Image: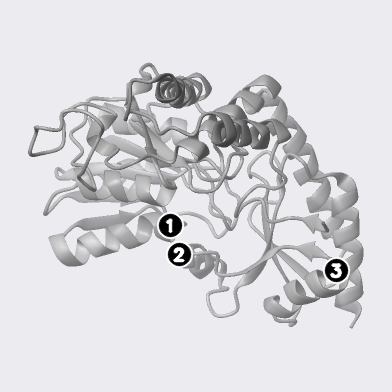
């Protein structure tokens, strides 16, 4: 395996303890959760509940029943956005949202006359929370914000935004795809009403896992309906969590793996993970600046970003840079628009895209050194 620098897409490698736990479940338990009273099914129930508990422990949630599992954070965001907003509502969002937020909002704008206001930010993606307060209208029902940009890496002032939302009795939905597991999150302290999370990035879990943590009293219609393993005589979905939102057989193997990776992250400590990654980010920013003709986007301050750094190399197409890094140097990076056209519009790279590195917990300074050496060689050509 070469040098993996695409942790913003999905983390790699995964902890051995997580892989072993999933293998043990599939070899020695096998039963699904919530669908039986025999020993193996009860053990599957216990493991799923353990994962809910670990989510609460990591983000300071109060009720494991309010941890809802989905197939990914995109499904989580779609569930909340489509299940909460009504015709004519007003939403405030950031200017650097991922399509997992932007597309559902634009669809509701088209189909249900949703009103959308985009909070202004600098070309580095820095948002002033006070600007959000000025956008509030009588029909503002939701503020949905990314915690950190998946292109610029910029960390948003979620705590300040949460205070504003609470003061005006507006619900706050946070997309933590780039921060959960890599940056401290406290739903109570930050006044986050709904925290959407993904399992396969900095939480170090398997793909196909994600969910949202409900930290308020909020009526959200489920995205789908079906079997829940109980209340089978009801013609409609039950009205209690988590069953209301978890129709169909869950991804038990994935949830079991996620529970173990959450335990792994909790044992290390998110603060220590952030400390290590911030050191690597700082090192990468300094080393990358040595490369001729490089243009680095976003803040050049490791305290203001997560492990996401986007750049272009002079007039060399971003695709060519990424291809040569892979083919000649065995370095894996992401290239393109990264499912976030709003961020690239801000950067002025909507037509050409950018190369993006995603620094994770298992990366080292040596990985950065090899990358910089390769970029210097490509730049000379």
Q: Quadrant of the C terminus?
A: bottom right
Taking the image as shown, residue 233 lies to the left or right of residue 7, namely left
Residue at 62%, 22% in the rendered image = 266
Q: Position of residue 162 (x, y in %)?
A: 38, 31
55 is higher (above) or lower (below) than 206: above
> Does residue 135 appear in the picture of this structure?
no
Residue tagged by mark 2?
Answer: 342
User: For residue 139, what is the image quadrant?
Assistant: top left
The residues tagged by marks 1 and 2 sit, at their Cα atoms, a distance apart of 6 Å
Residue occupied by mark 3:
375
On the image, numbered disc 1 is attached to which residue? 95
Pointer 1 and pointer 2: residues touching (CB < 8 Å)? yes
For label 3, the crowd category at 10 Å Cα-Cα, with few meaning under 14, some 14 to 19 and many 20 or more, is: many
Mark 1 or mark 2: which comes first in sequence?
Answer: 1
- Front position among marks 3 and 1: 3
Q: Position of residue 199 (x, y in %)?
A: 53, 40
Q: In terms of secondary structure, where does tag 3 sit?
A: helix
| Left or right, residue 209 beside residue 226 | right
Q: Nearer the viewer, residue 136 or 153?
A: 153
Name the one closer to the observer, 274 or 328.
328
Helix, strand or loop at label 2? It is helix
Residue 164: give x, y in percent of width and height. Answer: 33, 32
Residue 45 vs residue 26, the one in the foreground: 26
237 left or right of 347 in image: left
Q: Cα distance, mark 3 to mark 1?
A: 30 Å
Disc 2 from disc 3: Cα separation: 27 Å
In the image: residue 268, left or right of residue 160: right
Residue located farthest toward the top when viewing the structure as drawn: 62
Q: Position of residue 284 (x, y in %)?
A: 81, 51
Would residue 256 be visible to someone looking at this image? yes
Kindly indicate the quadrant of the structure image that contains residue 193. top left
């Amino acid at each position: 395996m070469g040098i993996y620098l695409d942790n913003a897409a999905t983390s790699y490698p995964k902890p051995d303890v997580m892989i072993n736990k999933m293998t043990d479940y599939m070899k020695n338990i096998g039963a699904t959760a919530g669908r039986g009273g025999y020993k193996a099914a009860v053990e599957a129930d216990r493991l799923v509940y353990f994962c809910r508990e670990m989510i609460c422990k990591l983000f300071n949630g109060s009720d494991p029943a309010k941890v809802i599992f989905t197939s990914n954070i995109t499904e989580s965001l779609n569930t909340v956005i489509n299940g909460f907003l009504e015709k004519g509502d007003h939403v405030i969002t950031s200017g650097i949202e991922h399509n997992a937020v932007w597309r559902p909002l634009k669809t509701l704008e088209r189909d249900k006359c949703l009103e959308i206001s985009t909070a202004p930010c600098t070309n580095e993606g820095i948002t002033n929370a006070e600007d959000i307060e000025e956008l509030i209208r009588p029909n503002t029902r939701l503020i949905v914000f990314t915690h950190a940009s998946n292109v610029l890496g910029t960390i948003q002032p979620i705590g300040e935004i949460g205070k504003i939302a609470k003061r005006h009795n507006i619900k706050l939905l946070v997309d933590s795809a780039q921060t959960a597991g890599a940056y401290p999150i406290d739903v109570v302290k930050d006044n986050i009403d709904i925290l959407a999370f993904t399992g396969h990035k900095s939480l170090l879990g398997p793909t196909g896992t994600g969910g949202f943590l409900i930290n308020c009293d909020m009526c959200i219609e489920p995205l789908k309906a079906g079997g829940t393993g109980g209340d089978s005589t009801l013609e409609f979905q039950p009205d209690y969590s988590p069953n209301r939102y978890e129709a169909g057989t869950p991804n038990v193997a994935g949830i079991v793996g996620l529970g173990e990776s959450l335990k792994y992250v909790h044992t290390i400590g998110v603060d220590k993970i952030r400390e290590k990654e911030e050191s690597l980010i700082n090192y990468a920013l300094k080393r990358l600046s040595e490369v001729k003709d490089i243009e680095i986007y976003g803040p050049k301050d490791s305290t203001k970003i997560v492990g996401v750094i986007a750049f272009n190399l002079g007039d060399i197409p971003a695709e060519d840079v990424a291809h040569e890094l892979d083919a000649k140097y065995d370095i894996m990076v992401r290239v393109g628009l990264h499912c976030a056209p709003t961020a690239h519009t801000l950067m002025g790279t909507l037509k050409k895209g950018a190369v993006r590195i995603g620094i994770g917990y298992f990366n080292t300074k040596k990985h950065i050194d090899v990358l910089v050496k390769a970029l210097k060689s490509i730049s000379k050509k």
